[in-house]
Image (tube, helix red, strand yellow):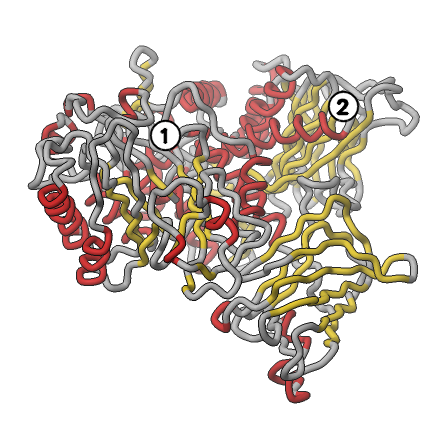
Amino acid sequence: MFLHFTVNTFTDREWGTGDEDPSIFDPTRLDAGQWVRVAREAGFKAVILTAKHHDGFTLWPSEFTNHSVASSPWRDGQGDVVGEVAEAARAEGLELGLYLSPWDMHEPSYGDEEEYNRFYQGQLRELLSRYGPIAEVWFDGAKGENAGEMSYAFDEYRALVRQLQPGAVMFSDEGPDVRWIGNERGFAGETNWSTLDPTKVEIGKPGQGDYLNAGEREGPAWIPGECDVSIRRGWFWHPDQEPKSLDQLLEIYFKSVGRNCLLLLNVPPNDQGRIPAEDVARLTEFRVALDRIFARDLANGAEAEASSVWGADLHRYGGSKVLDGKTDTYWAPEEGERSGSVTLGLPETPTFNVIRIQEPIAMGQRVAAYRVEAWVDGAWKRISMGTTIGYKKLDRLHEPVTTDRVRLVVEEALAEPLIAEMGLHFDPHLSPEPDSAGPALRSGPESAQNPVDSLFQRQHQGMGTLAEVFLYAPNSGRASELFEAAFSEMDRVEADLSRYRSASEVSRINREAARGPVTTDPMVFRFLREALSLSARTGGAFDITVGPLVEVWGSSGESGILPSKQELSEARARSGWERVVMDEDSRTIRFLTGGVELDVGGIGKGWALDRAAQRLRELGVGSALLGLGQSSYVAIGAPPEAPGWRITIPDPDRPGQALSEIWLRDRALSTSGNTEKYFVLDGRRYGHIIDPRSGRPAEGTKQITVTGSSATEADAFSTALFVMGPEEAKSLLDEAPDLRALLVFDHTGSRRLLSTRWPDPIEH
């Protein structure tokens, strides 16, 4: 992941001027750990930092210039961004790369080739010798139109890299190790050879983009491509720009990684020194989408038959090698053959729209032309075709294909074609997912169809569970836009609130709020204010600070040993919503004692649903049902000619049977229970819902269902009522006339059903 950050971040410019006052560089919340955690959680393996951009301002205290962090107020002039990023990368297990711009608008010696190249190498030496192992050094030929005449001594720069960081790869138009792909859109060529003739390329020379984009067949040097692109329109953060959409990021992925290229995605920190929440949410959505596409290989269990096998050695080179999950084993045809095929007999008849093919890249890049065919209606039908494959080729199909046989045909190769892997996947962003209707959600009578709008449904992994949205829209294109908006909002909430993500706002608050007031995002502040209000309304039966108790009981479930009195006492001493203080004027939150830990598990899903539903309402949706984990729902309007969205409440004692049904219209519903999450010790069952007041798992309750005006409120009250007995629960509900509830308690070996304002008749 690329990190563009310098004085430009504070001047709202893409290129600086070189005469910026260093005092403008003062990121008050800079957290390099957050940058690197975001990169790791999004799936990146390395971060590359712009240690110096064209303005000449250095993010480390350089001995060769005063235009640096040492002259800024940040960290009282004692800071070192490069050092903090290097330390964070080591802590998170990511590799570090650095970009040192050769163009320096601040340096007076620029234009004097001997003096300036000596100056540049001095700064390069500082970077290569101070910060531990460097995985990649990024060079380009940057030089503005008004820059003075200057020839960069790249041969000397490279020699210095080889001397001080022999394990580092070097990037530039001409390599020598990895090359620019010829554009900043993140797209490799449909034909993309990893080989190149560097004598045909010059760093910074215009007009060579097409050559770099495709590489050269049988080129003399192995210089694979790297696709660089920014998540925003600019390379630096600007307050008026938004991150690219999920569809745009997926297109970039398939046209970079899916075309034998490395992807270097720039994600710029903002002027506070943090990756913006909206960018974190989009990266999370991107990661979830990729996991969803590639988590399941529909070719698993297939049988492979090859047209021929090298030396008839099926064990080492047979067609089955393309299905063994290893990129260092491969199918090889008979010696001397430059074409051939592998046919997959699929165990079922899957539907797919993504084809994955990989060559064993350590053996070189060989395939020059191929096609993929499917057995359809009694004949082979071509479904995709291409030229190069390389390390990975991903073909997205315009229409999904359902078949029990697929054939890869290599038409042309430079030597015997070698295929390491083949896979088939389904991308729901291209097509509606097959057989995706969920049994728990029903939209009312089948005949209640709007003659204009149609019902669409889509699922999404979010908030640690399965999100599902049903909505009415005029066409599939509009429905896809609405699904993306809803799921993006859920992902944004998860990125902010999850205490299991070290880069989230809640995790940051948990780390810092005991040391002093923490300024937080307006939406997170609003959420926490609502959480404290609900904690107070329920008398602490729902408590946003239950985290320490959840941890101590979770550890017991894993170890099989109950927590000691001392452990419980210490956890309770760190819990209690009264220990959280919020200041509306400064939008800060602080903890009165150390060890307090916010845990949004009781209402996080509800908040995510409320935010997603609000987004759909803003986009004009009049009828939709949003659900998370089949326990929390929000309804917008109702299906045509139906009183609402019909929700089935499960019976906790009779699996597969319904306890009740309710029509939900412009309301929310939440169910809390312990039938699935619990552990047993010495014959006693301990559920996952903790009573914050006693510090122990709740007992005597089987299931609580609540409907209310918001999913956040319904979540909080279903949790609070679960830890109460029948009388206390009734008293609380009497104080909340807008709520409806269905309660199932244990009662001397049987069960006791209570309801408050519940519309469906229940047999008590």
On screen, residue 620 versus residue 26, left or right, reads: right
Q: Nearer the viewer, residue 129 or 210?
A: 210
Q: Amino acid at mark 1?
A: Gly
User: Which circle, 2 or 1, is nearer the viewer?
Assistant: 2
Rendering quarter of residue 547: top left
Q: Nearer the viewer, residue 230 or 739?
A: 230
Residue at image coords 30%, 51%: 96
To which residue does mark 2 refer? 473
Tell me the crowding category of disc 2: few under 14, some 14 to 19, or many 20 or more residues within 10 angstroms, Cα based: many
Give the quarter of the image for residue 129: bottom left
Can you identify the residue that label 1 sits on? 576
Q: Residue at x 62, y 15 (%)?
A: 618
Residue extending furthest toward the top: 585
Front residue (pair 304, 749): 304
Q: Residue 461, can we see it?
A: yes
Q: Is residue 590 visible?
A: no
Whether residues under marks 2 and 1 lie with C-beta atoms below 8 angstroms apart, the answer is no
Question: Which residue is nearer to you in this view: 703 or 154?
Answer: 154
